[in-house]
Image (cartoon, rainbow, N blue to C red):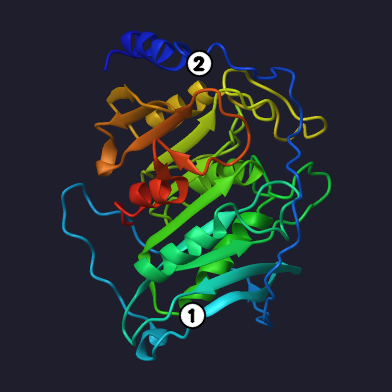
Amino acid sequence: MNKLLRCISLATLFLLGACGGDSDSSASAPADDAGTADSASAADVSATTDVSTTPDTGTAPDAGAPEPDIVLGPACGEPTASENQALYELNVGGMTREYRLTVPQAEAGVPLSVMVGFHGGGEAYADYPQEQAFRSLGAEQGVIMAYPRGALVAPNEGEWQLNTSDDMMHDINFINALLDDLSTRYCVDVTRLYATGYSLGSMFIYEVACQMNDRFAAVASFAGSMPISVNSCEMVNKLPVMHIHGTDDSTISYSDEWDWKAWPSVGPMMDIPQLMEFWGDQNGCQDVDWTDNNDGRYVVYDGCDEGVRVEHHRLDGHGHWWPQTIDGVSTHQVMWNFMSGFTR
C-alpha cells in the first residue's frame, strides 16, 4: 500500500470515534491494583535448574504450507496428570524465579499447547484475569496454562523488564527457561506456544514478541504499549499480534504518548495507533480494514509476510479494567480464537 495513503487511512481508522475518550496524556508509570493474593492453594514443587543457553526451535512454515510434524519428546511416553495451581521454581542466572501452572489431563502421546499469561504491575500473587475461564479452556482444548511471576530488579520501575537490552535479559532468559522446563516435564507441542498479558504484562508481551518470535506462535494482550525507541526487535519469524485497548484508559493512554516517572532506559511509550502500525510494519502487512461493532472497532492488518495477521479491538468508552466480553464473546475466547489459528 502506498505509504502516504496508508498513513491517511490509519489516521482515519484510529481517530474517528475515539477522540471523546478521557485519556490522561500526562500519565506516568502505570500502577495496577495488586488485587487479592492467590486464593487457591498451590502445591510447592521445587525445580531448580541453572540455565545458560536457549535452544533453537526452528522457523515458521511458509504461508499455505502444511503444518510441521510434531516431534514428541521423552515426556510424551507417559500420560499427563492434571495439575491445578502447582508452583514451580527455576534458578535462572542466579535468580530464583517462580511460575504457577495448570495442566490438563491427557493420554500418553497427546501433545499439549502452552499459553503463558503475564500479570499486571503488582499482581504477581493475584489470579490472572478470567483465570477460571482460561483454566476451563485449557481442559477443553489441551492447553497448559503457565503464569510466571515478575521480579522488581533495580533500577526498574516495573516487575517486567521493558526495552530489553543485552545487559538486561533476565526476564527473557526466565521465559526461555520456563518453556524449556515445560518441554522437559510434559508432552508439549512446541509449534503451539502462545502468550497473553494485561497492563504491564501486555507491555512485556511486546518484549516477548521482539525477543522470542522464534518460539512463540502468536500473542494477544490487553491494555499495554511499548517504547517508542526500541533497543532491539529482530523478526527471526513474523508473529501474529492481537491488541485490545479501551479509548478511555487513563492509566495507559490510547491516543497519547506517555512517559514513566523514573525509568529512563525505557523512555516514552507509544500511543495505540503507533503500536498497531509498528506491528503491521514489522510483519510486512499490506492491507488494513475495519468494521464497527457494539463495543467499538475491529481492525485487521492483512496481506502480511509468512501468512500472519495483526488485529486490534478498539473498545470505545472502556477504561483500564479487563473486559469480560468483546462484542458478545468472552475476552479469553476472543484471544484464543485468534492465537490458536497459528503455529510456529
- Which residue has dot 2 on it? 18
Q: Position of residue 46 (x, y in %)?
A: 69, 82
- Which label sits in the foreground, 1 or 2? 2
Please give the name of the residue rendered at 30% of the width and 42% of the height, measured from the top-left corner: 308
Residue extending farthest to the bottom is 78
Q: Nearer the viewer, residue 243 or 93?
A: 243
Pick whichever, 266 or 319, lies toward us: 319
**SS at circle 1:** helix
- Residue 23 x/y as whole percent: 65, 19
Residue 341 makes an appearance in the image: yes
Image coords of residue 210 (percent x, y): 50, 44
At x 40%, y 87%, the residue is 74
Q: Amino acid at mark 2?
A: Ala
Establish if 251 lies above or below 339: above
* Quarter of image, res 71: bottom left
Where residue 184 is drawn, which disc sits there? 1
Q: Check disc 2 and report its element: helix, strand or loop.
A: loop
Q: Residues within 10 Å of mark 2 (few under 14, many from 20)?
A: many
Kindly tell me whether residue 142 is visible in this rendering.
no
Q: Nearer the viewer, residue 155 or 205?
A: 205
* 3D distance between C-alphas at marks 1 and 2: 46 Å
